Image (tube, rainbow, N blue to C red):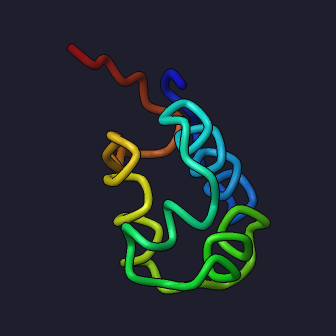
Amino acid sequence: MNLRRVVTAQDLGLAVRAARHAKGLDQAELAERCGVTRMTISRLERGESVNAATAVTALSECGYELLAAPKFSKVSVR
């Protein structure tokens, strides 16, 4: 997964799903690593309401981090 612009909860869910797939994890494995249920990961990936800490942890467990930048800015990652 490369850089991905996230502006909605659905975008975040798709980013988590892509990161999970890139890491080769299924929802149950990611849920265990995050200390939540598989259903919580499923809700996150569908863009439904979950704890923000869960989303950050899920991305981190997949080897990604969340960055915040001003809207419409150009971002460079080294």
Quadrant in which the C terminus appears:
top left
Based on the displayed image, in which of its 4 quarters is residue 74 positioned?
Answer: top left
Could you tell me how many numbered marks the image carries? 0
Q: Is residue 77 above or below residue 39?
A: above
33 and 1: which one is in front?
A: 33
Q: Position of residue 69 (x, y in %)?
A: 36, 44
72 displayed left or right of 64: right
Query: Which of the two residues, 33 or 49, is positioned nearer the viewer here?
Result: 33
**x%, y% of residue 47?**
74, 68
Q: Is residue 12 left or right of residue 62?
A: right
Judge whether 41 appears above or below 63 on screen.
Answer: below
Q: Position of residue 17 (x, y in %)?
A: 65, 48
Please tell me which residue is depicted at 35% across the width and 66% down the height of the picture: 57
Q: In which image quadrant can residue 37 be found? A: bottom right
What is the x, y in percent for residue 10?
Answer: 75, 59
Q: Residue at x 57, y 51 (%)?
A: 16
Q: Quadrant of the N terminus?
A: top right
Q: In the image shown, does 75 or 21 lie closer to the viewer?
A: 21
Picture quarter containing residue 63? top left
Please tell me whether residue 47 is drawn above or below residue 68 in the rendered image.
Answer: below
Asked whether, in this view, residue 32 is left or right of residue 39, the answer is left
Which residue is rendered at x = 27% and y = 19% of the image? Answer: 77
Residue, far left: 78
